[in-house]
Image (cartoon, helix red, strand yellow):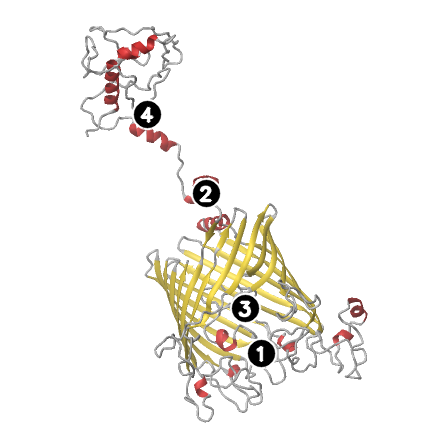
């Protein structure tokens, strides 16, 4: 079909009107008055048209239409030049008079006909088959209403108007799948007890003649699947869960069966079958609900806690993390001026609960209140928590303005009493027939009198002086201070301790009696003081500098305080009495400094100074995918040499490397290597206590120098 201009459409419409004029005339005779025709010029008057329509059109009638002239009746419309004037229009006999005639889709017969803005029949080119000249003008007028600008200048309210409205309820899905094979060589340091990692069992069994006395390598691969959906019920109501399936499960470590066990055959007992059939329990890391109110956000349930760099509270969401600081709490967070304020009540320990045996109440409940640990936290911080705040911070960075975040985290924990129990057993109930813990002849509670305060200041500076430059400096401190009146599991409350068999003179669980005899509640039956003053402190610092180009570098450093432990004990307080363990500050184990020494051999940063210079190069950067290669050096020295196994200041020198690949934000892979040169603090010294060993650890029987340790690790992460 050949496209026609708008003028052609007017011409065809005029011919149709002329052909139907007799029928229109008959219909007009039934009307009481003829509709008026409106002038385009508002100053001209509206004239009444004649009631009857002439049956014939004069041959010589030549009406000219102009924007300022009065428009005639519809029968008097000007015809295009290419339309021949008819002397008379006769209605054919074979054509019935229609009640109506076809109109264009967008045309309705009006009571009044407005003048078009432009004369539709003026300057019509019969050979012009293109769009009308004013077609693009409509778009020019539409374009004038749109104010285009950079994305950072778009009004947030305007953006909301064009953003599709969410339909509630809906679910935001996120999660991670991680596969992590690791090869560890000589992580026990060949000292038979100065490392938390045990030597291969090949070196110990069979007892008479070990399978491989020289074995040093341990290989394993673990798997973790994390699913964290957030259910948005309304704009102000949310429910969030964080579930871990196969949480750090060693691949092949959950056998379905043992083929060589006697008994009846089973359908799945096949000689070449796999050994990974049992599903491990689901770990619920988070399950909480949120409510947005006019005065803040209320959160209740089990949740992960994170603060600053993560040396005090770490949520364990890092791709190589293993733990996560879980806390059961009720929290309120609200903005205060340019800051955010959060107050919580936590339930770190609610004491003993009834065993499943006996009468079932259907719901869990406490059996007492004196053994409940209470905890309150307050935090005041400046850091983005919403999408808009993140975008504002990014905008400031693009404007070459430095950004400062930080705050203070405060916590207070107190507990009156406790039921002592072994850490490997469930807490005993009142009807237990199991023997009491070692050193006790009953399950009576002990007065604890715990009162601790924690402080963690945090600061962070970000600056991009140029588009291709980046600077980050971040610090976090940690201090725990307080008093524990009874840091042992012995009964206290003795005024006259001459008779060890005597019962306590003071009921220390009673606040009034305790206030009248404070010293008695710090003395056991032997007259020994049981109280302990707690003071732990540490600091971690990280920095990153990029002054253009693919290379970044920085220096990470920190320290954690430590004590001496028991006499001839050392070992960072791991095998010391509880009251001596309180001298050692321990960073959260999900805060990683290296691959071997702090992460595996000791378990975390404690009783140590460390310095970690590093350099990283970024290459093969396509904007979507890129690779990185990083080199680290970590030097460590003991904070208190008497708290180490070898009673020596220098702990070790470690070198790490990492080759990483990133594909958008959905996939990453890494190949890590580490090499540790252990020094005197990790040596075995005769007579000092072992940290870890098969069977009863006992003291070292001879001196031993630590050996070289190395590792090769891979990691693949799918994030969604």
Q: Which residue is mark 4?
A: 106
Q: Residue furthest bottom?
A: 208
Q: Position of residue 231 (x, y in %)?
A: 50, 52
Q: Which residue is mark 2?
A: 165
Along the polypeptide, which appears first: circle 2 or circle 4? 4
- Give the answer, above or below, for where 151 lies relative to 117: below
User: Along the horizontal axis of the image, is 615 left or right of 681?
Assistant: left
Q: Which residue is mark 3?
A: 588
Mark 3: secondary structure: loop
What separation in Å lies between label 3 and label 2 (alpha carbons)? 41 Å
Along the polypeptide, which appears first: circle 3 or circle 2? 2
Q: In which quadrant is the N terminus drawn?
A: top left
What separation in Å lies between label 1 and label 2 (alpha carbons)? 56 Å
Q: Which residue is mark 1?
A: 574
What separation in Å lies between label 1 and label 3 (alpha carbons)? 15 Å
What separation in Å lies between label 4 and label 1 (alpha carbons)? 86 Å
User: Along the horizontal axis of the image, is 517 left or right of 312?
Assistant: right
Is disc 1 surrounded by few (<14), some (14 to 19) or many (20+) residues within 10 Å?
Answer: some
Given this view, does label 4 or label 1 mark the residue nearer the observer? 4
Front one among 378 and 329: 329
């Amino acid at each position: 079909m050949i496209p026609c201009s708008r003028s052609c459409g007017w011409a065809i419409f005029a011919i149709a009107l002329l052909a139907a004029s007799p029928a229109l005339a008959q219909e007009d005779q039934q009307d009481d008055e003829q509709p008026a025709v409106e002038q385009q010029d508002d100053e001209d008057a509206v004239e009444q048209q004649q009631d009857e329509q002439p049956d014939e059109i004069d041959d010589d009638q030549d009406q000219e239409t102009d924007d300022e002239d009065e428009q005639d009746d519809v029968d008097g419309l000007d015809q295009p030049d290419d339309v021949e004037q008819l002397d008379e229009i006769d209605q054919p006999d074979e054509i019935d008079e229609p009640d109506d005639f076809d109109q264009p889709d967008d045309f309705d017969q009006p009571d009044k006909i407005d003048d078009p803005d432009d004369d539709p029949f003026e300057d019509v080119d019969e050979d012009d088959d293109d769009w009308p000249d004013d077609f693009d003008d409509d778009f020019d007028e539409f374009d004038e209403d749109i104010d285009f600008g950079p994305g950072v200048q778009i009004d947030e309210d305007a953006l909301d108007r064009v953003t599709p409205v969410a339909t509630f309820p809906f679910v935001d899905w996120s999660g991670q799948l991680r596969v992590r094979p690791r090869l560890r060589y000589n992580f026990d340091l060949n000292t038979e007890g100065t490392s938390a990692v045990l030597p291969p069992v090949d070196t110990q069994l069979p007892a008479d003649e070990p399978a491989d006395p020289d074995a040093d390598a341990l290989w394993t691969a673990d798997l973790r699947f994390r699913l964290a959906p957030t259910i948005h019920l309304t704009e102000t109501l949310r429910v969030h869960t964080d579930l871990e399936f196969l949480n750090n499960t060693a691949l092949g470590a959950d056998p379905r069966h043992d083929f060589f066990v006697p008994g009846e055959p089973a359908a799945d007992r096949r000689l070449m079958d796999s050994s990974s059939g049992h599903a491990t329990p689901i770990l619920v890391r988070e399950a909480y609900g949120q409510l947005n109110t006019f005065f803040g956000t209320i959160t209740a349930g089990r949740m992960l806690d994170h603060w600053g760099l993560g040396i005090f509270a770490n949520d364990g969401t890092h791709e190589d993390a293993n733990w996560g600081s879980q806390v059961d709490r009720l929290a309120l967070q609200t903005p205060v001026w340019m800051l955010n304020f959060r107050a919580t009540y936590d339930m770190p320990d609610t004491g003993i609960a009834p065993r499943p045996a006996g009468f079932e109440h259907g719901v869990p409940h406490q059996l007492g209140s004196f053994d409940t640990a209470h905890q309150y936290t307050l935090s005041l911080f400046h850091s983005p928590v919403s999408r808009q705040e993140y975008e504002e911070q990014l905008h400031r960075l693009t404007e070459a303005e430095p950004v400062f975040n930080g705050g203070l985290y405060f916590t207070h924990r107190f507990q009156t009493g406790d039921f002592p129990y072994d850490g490997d057993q469930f807490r005993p109930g009142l009807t237990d027939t199991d023997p009491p813990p070692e050193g006790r002849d009953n399950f009576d509670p002990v007065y604890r009198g715990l009162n601790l305060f924690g402080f963690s200041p945090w600061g962070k500076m970000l600056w991009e002086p140029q588009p291709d430059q980046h600077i980050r400096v971040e610090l976090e401190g940690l201090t725990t201070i307080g008093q524990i009146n009874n840091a042992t599991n012995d009964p206290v409350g003795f005024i006259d301790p001459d008779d060890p068999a005597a019962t306590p003179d003071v009921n220390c669980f009673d606040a009034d009696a305790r206030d009248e005899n404070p010293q008695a509640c710090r003395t056991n039956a032997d007259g020994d003081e049981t109280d302990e003053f707690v003071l732990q402190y540490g600091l971690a610092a990280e920095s990153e500098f990029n002054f253009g180009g693919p290379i970044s570098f920085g220096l990470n450093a920190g320290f954690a305080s430590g004590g001496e432990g028991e006499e001839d004990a050392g070992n960072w307080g791991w095998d010391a009495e509880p009251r001596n363990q309180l001298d050692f500050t321990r960073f959260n184990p999900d805060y990683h400094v290296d691959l071997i020494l702090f992460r595996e051999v000791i378990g975390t940063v404690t009783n140590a100074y460390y310095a970690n210079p590093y350099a990283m190069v970024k290459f093969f950067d396509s904007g979507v995918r890129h690779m990185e290669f990083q080199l680290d050096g970590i030097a460590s020295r003991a904070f208190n040499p008497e708290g180490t196994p070898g009673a020596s200041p220098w702990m070790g020198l470690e070198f790490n490397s990492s080759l990483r690949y990133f594909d958008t934000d959905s996939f990453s892979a890494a190949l890590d290597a580490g090499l540790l040169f252990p020094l005197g603090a990790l040596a075995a010294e005769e007579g000092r206590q072992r940290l870890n060993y098969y069977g009863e650890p006992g003291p070292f029987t001879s001196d031993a120098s630590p050996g070289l340790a190395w590792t090769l690790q891979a990691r693949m992460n799918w994030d969604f």
